[in-house]
Amino acid sequence: MTGVVAPDIAVHANPGVLAAAVAARLVTKLVDLQAAGTVPKIVLTGGSTGIAVLAQLRTTVARDAVDWGQVEMYWGDERFLPPGHPDRNETQAREALLDHVPVDPAKVFPMGADTGTGPSGAEAAAEEYADVLARAARPEDHGPVPAFDVLMLGMGGEGHTASVFPHSPAVYETERTVVAVHGCPKPPPTRVSLTLPAIRQAAEVWVMTTGEEKAAAVKLALGGAGEVAIPVAGARGRRRTRWLLDRSAADRLPRDLVPPIA
């Protein structure tokens, strides 16, 4: 962990408060970036917390402070299912927010869907998304992916993040930015995911998680566990890593790490 900036930790009373607080943080970040003349590059996540944040953003009056046509949106992972399938992260994000704000479709970059190929098609989808990211990267990004401004992630109870699971081939990947993931321990078994090196190109990584079933993995990740066993431990931003937790998810953290509950 030498040379790694210590993460910021925020603890909220319950999942609803957390989702509202993260939505407020995101609006502020987007407005500040646009005020500085930047087209923000944001990476969305699925899962109950990630979608709850987008739903909160949809209902807040402050959403209208954002020029949604000047925001680029990407995804950290996707379930390799048919287009429009209700379990796809893209489908849920569109229903929660994107269909309700004036985004520019040319600036929304979903991962590929299963158009009849079956699981084998995930390999091509991963390669295609890696190409999308490479084309979006600028020379000053110094790499094959954009320097995302905010990359949002969830976390599983065993410590997976995006679709990088403990001890899986994806967690050992050091060259590719996007991989197909097969045999996931939770359905659906086939997915497409950013790799940890790609995640670490983001300026800020926000890890959002709730529930007592996540508390043990949160403790391990913030206690210096290795990313092979606890992949979320390898999810770090270049400038900032935020851990946004509810009281239950933070329950096993040492008291000196836990800030006052918001």
Image (spheres, helix red, strand yellow):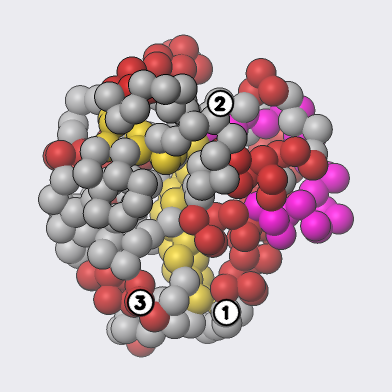
- Distance from label 3 to label 2 (Cα)? 32 Å
Q: Position of residue 98 (x, y in %)?
A: 71, 39
Which span is picked out in magenta? Answer: 54-74
- Residue 14 bears which disc, if any? 1
Our reading of the magenta stretch's main secondary structure is helix
Q: Mark 2–mark 1 contact, CB under 8 Å?
A: no
Q: Position of residue 14 (x, y in %)?
A: 57, 79
> Residue tagged by mark 3?
213
> Residue tagged by mark 2?
109
Give the residue displayed 27% in from the left and 24% down from the top: 120
Q: Position of residue 87 (x, y in %)?
A: 51, 47
Q: Quadrant of the C terminus?
A: bottom right
Amino acid type of the residue that numbered disc 1 sits on in the rendered structure: Asn
Left or right placement of residue 228 versus residue 217 in this view? left
Q: Position of residue 216 (x, y in %)?
A: 27, 76
Amino acid type of the residue that numbered disc 2 sits on in the rendered structure: Phe
- Residue 204 bears which disc, if any? none
Q: Secondary structure at mark 3?
A: helix
Specify whether residue 57 is painted magenta.
Answer: yes
Asked if one can make out residue 243 in the rendered structure from this viewpoint, the answer is yes
Q: Secondary structure at mark 2?
A: loop
Q: Secondary structure at mark 1?
A: loop
Amino acid type of the residue that numbered disc 3 sits on in the rendered structure: Glu
Sequence-wise first label, 2 or 1: 1
